[in-house]
Amino acid sequence: RQLSELVQIKTEANPLLSTQFLSRLYRSSLLFFCSATMKWDWNNVEIRKMKPSLGLIKQSLDIFSSPLKSLLGFLAVVGNRISVAYIKAYSKSESSVISSSKLSETIEQAQQCGCLSMIDSDLLVWTHDQIRQAAYLLCSAEKENKIHYSYGLFLLRLPDITQAG
């Protein structure tokens, strides 16, 4: 099969997923430049074995650092968009499931890997709904419940936090 056909099948012709898929193929040495023929080549057999779409994104997220996976899992549970100020305040609360240590770096990593975008210098949004869905899969049911509970407590105390700050 032609590489373009494999990419189309595995990514459902989604441009974002196609880019990530090709990057993953290259990093995994399934797509490589053959210096003898001076052409790109690929491993059809191994590429066919790869999971499509959501599974592909989940596999990509699994290789991230633990703090980045925790942040993405948290953000997937709490919504489509969230203020960085809220994330920072929440991370300092006693019931937080994310670490405040190096939080700015972790947020920057999430942007660099293409999972999140910053709007108006304080609002983080998912770059694609399927990335959020895959990040949601990073959380067990127990962790999801803990996030809902702890973030709910944080929001209930928010007026106290904003008046004190």
Image: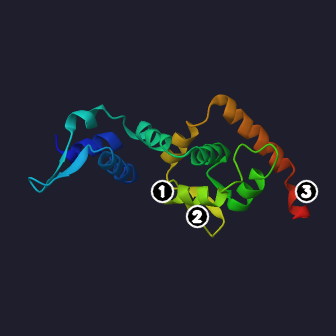
Label 2 neighbour load within 10 Å: few <14, some 14-19, many 20+:
some
Horizontal and vertical percent position of residue 160? 91, 56
Question: What's the residue at 68%, 34% (across, down)?
Answer: 143
Q: Where is residue 22 in the image (x, y as percent from the top left)?
A: 31, 50
Residue 53 place in picture, x, y as percent: 40, 40
- The residue nearer to you, when weighing 20 against 64, is 64
* Amino acid type for the residue under numbered disc 3: Asp
Question: Viewed as shown, does residue 146 lie left or right of 8?
Answer: right
Q: Name the residue under label 1.
A: 114
Q: Is mark 3 on a helix, strand or loop?
A: helix
Is 151 or 106 nearer to us in this picture? 106
For disc 3, the marked residue is 160
Q: Considering only vertical position in the picture, is 130 above or below 45? A: below
Q: Is residue 51 above or below residue 33?
A: above
**Quadrant hosting residue 81:** bottom right
Q: Which mark is residue 139?
A: none
| Number of numbered discs on residues | 3
Q: Mark 2 points at which residue?
A: 118
Left of 85 or right of it: where is 133?
Answer: left
Left or right: 75 as drawn, with respect to 114: right
Q: In which quarter of the image is the N terminus?
A: top left
User: Residue at coordinates 65% horizontally, 42% vertically from top-left?
Assistant: 77
Within 10 Å of disc 1 (Cα), the crowding (few <14, some 14-19, many 20+) is some
Question: What residue lies at 48% left-to-right and 56% top-to-bottom?
Answer: 114
Q: Distance between the residues labelled 1 and 3?
A: 34 Å
